[in-house]
Amino acid sequence: MAREGVTLDTQGFLNDMRSRVGYAGQIVHVESMPHSSAAYGRLSASLNPLLQHALQLREIDRFYTHQAQAIDALLAGENVVVATGTASGKSLCYNVPVLNVCADSSRTGATALYLFPAKALAQDQLRALNELTAPLPARPTAATYDGDTPQHERAAVRKNVRLLLTNPEMLHVGILPNHRLWSRFLRRLKFVVIDEGHMYRGVFGSHIAMLIRRLRRICRRYGANPQFIVTSATLGNPKEHAEGITGLPMTAITDDGAPSAGREFALWNPPIIDDAKSARRSVLVEGAELFSWLVATGTRTLSFVRTRQAAELMYRISEENLQRYETSNARVSSYRAGYVPEERREIEAALSTGELTGVVTTNALELGIDIGHLDATVLNGYPGSLASTFQQAGRSGRRGERGLSIMVVYDNPLEQYLARHPDILFRRGMEHARISTTNPRILDPHLVCAAVEAPFGEIPGDIELFGGDEVVTEALDRLSHDSYLIGRDRRGTEQWYPHPKAGAHPASDVSLRSTSGDNYVLVEETTGVVLETIAEEHAFAYAHEGAVYLHRGDQYMVSDLNLTTKNVMLQRTNVEYHTTSMADTDMTVLTTENEKQEGPVKASVGQVEVERTVYRYSKRRHDRDDVVSYGDVDLPSRNFKTVGLWWTVPEEMTDALRKYAPKSANEKEAEALADAFVASALHACEHACISLLPLFALCDRNDIGGLSTPYHPDTKEATIFIYDGIPGGVGIAERGYDVLRELWQETLTMLNECPCENGCPSCVQSPKCGNNNEMLDKGGARLLLEMLVGETQ
């Protein structure tokens, strides 16, 4: 049990770390983020007296500036996006106008739909909403509706609910396909709340944009035209992003009036343990030590990791650490997607009550679930965006006392660059969130779902709602050709109906979180117990034969991945390594949609086809992350079409590079050395540019792929490709095309600053490299980038 009343001395803890045995200068920067006072605003609109009384009973008698602005705008009929910091009271921005309208229209029974990205968040918000509405004499019925709602309760929810809290998946498979059962609710729908809007980016966000268009379409069928409220962490483009999600003009409110107690935010760089390779100590080992030290002193701590595997591995290491601390009674747990709901609720409750002192979690607890006050957060690796970085850090220091956040950086180029340039984290503007509303792999299945819900073209405005004539016509042609939709003339209007091939419930086959329709089931071989379900691309990458897979701190060895049954069989194991897959890539240019002259080269963006084959995996030690051995993987290639960015390197530039190649008196050998130098320079430049692209686009390095070649048959020149790793693309490559020169400049700066001689994991090496980081030349990449930005001497 955590000690109540213990106040964390943030500076004292950091000083204690500096004095510990084994400290080697890991703290490379401490940002002291200042306290800020609250700024209050006055409402222009008048609230219902009953609601005012209910708010006063909760000691809410004034609003922060952003709350007042949002409430006024919503009560004036506008669609609003509120993008402010963690714990800034965004829920009042939507609850007050929703409850005000409900109080004023108690006879007509106005309804509101709340969408949360996680079931736990919906349950948490229901408790808060019920507390707020308890004093109202005509209290609007509120309920959650998700996969955990018992079947025998669902009819009563549909009949009585006015405030419905659900998640996108339930709207997708449970509500819209059965909209006739929800006609009462949908006909009176006045508000749609989309919480945690920054989470809806990439593939997930693109699916949500289509889902919201389907919702708006069915609302039109019932004569409803609800207002939309999107709340988000701070983004670089909140208005644009919310408009992309909803398809509606939005009013953006970004001035945060909430107070902040401030925090110390430290950057922690693990020490170099192999000078020759510039290899650093494992982030998971360093992060587990920090987490263990914090919780051992009663400091309530969340430790964020980026993957399910990392969550289980760090939990294991932390448990071992705490067993060695004889004075510690701290209890910790892991938490991530994939656990059954009962497990997640138990962990949330135990953390909230103090029964657990700390939790190792994926971004599942980045959201605003109420888990009580926390003192510290440890971020193991850059979360992939500034928005997520400060969302995770903001989970600590919620009692009006200063919080502590420590980000432990990996030895990849991006994170080492951030460690050397902390101003990027603390001074630079937020990234832009990207989605795609034209990706055929996402648009097409939602059009089929829409046609099942009501014939497409039957409801006025269908075509405009989903992207206009050109986009929708092409999609309908594809779906007709592939026998998913059938076009029929209805009184001079073409309407589209589902083909029997589409099935009665196509929504069940469309995952909102991937572009792959195939999922694999992970089964413990000896017991037959199903552990979890993962998408095909994740199965090929993390659950191939020979892989070590972690679930709830337990290690499993994958004994078989069956392509026919889509079952992955796991056996318990206990080894001192984890596994990382490697893939080979080939590329075909399909269309060029835009091109420009950028410096001395021609840059292009367009449709490409990627052939990706997982062929090998490495076994890496937990403590050092170096390779123990390799294993082969026998899996089929995955082909997909996506959007790519590429630039060609003309012959005069490759000739200039060849002059710097190693020399030989033998003509053939000299030619071979020059060829290898050019290929290595291109390869290193590709790796380095990919590593820094997440500075400009809200994405993870794993969302991006690349290829470099001294000659590509489609371009007829040396070419570097960077592509969206997501079928159909979600705007990452287009963003790279827009900021290409800035990307080159930042990449050159990163190479110049990295102290290694010949290239290391902190500059040009990639853990995902299909060529095992061979044929990489840091000096050649630097020369090439100098030519690209015009800095050649």
Image (spheres, rainbow, N blue to C red):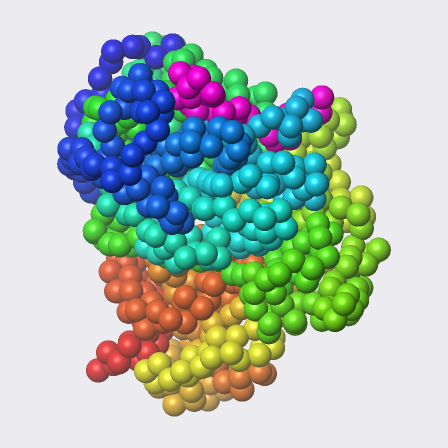
Q: Is residue 192 above or below residue 302?
A: below
Q: Is residue 788 above or below residue 450?
A: below
The answer to whether any part of residue 101 appears in the image is yes
Image quarter for residue 11? top left
Which residue sits at x=42%, y=79%?
A: 603
- Image quarter where the N terminus lies is top left
How many dots with numbers?
Answer: 0
Q: Position of residue 298 (x, y in %)?
A: 31, 15
Side (left or right) of 224 relative to 379: right
In front here: 332 or 476?
476
Which residue sits at x=38%, y=36%?
A: 97
Q: Is residue 495 above or below residue 147?
A: below
Which residue sits at x=59%, y=41%?
A: 187
In front here: 450 or 349?
450
Q: What is the magenta range? A: 126-152
Farthest residue, direction right: 500
In front here: 753 or 575?
753
Q: Position of residue 399 (x, y in %)?
A: 26, 22
Which residue sits at x=40%, y=82%?
A: 596
130 within the magenta span: yes
Side (left or right) of 656 relative to 672: left
Q: Is residue 299 above or below residue 696?
A: above
Q: Position of residue 359 (x, y in %)?
A: 43, 25
- Image quarter where the C terminus lies is bottom left
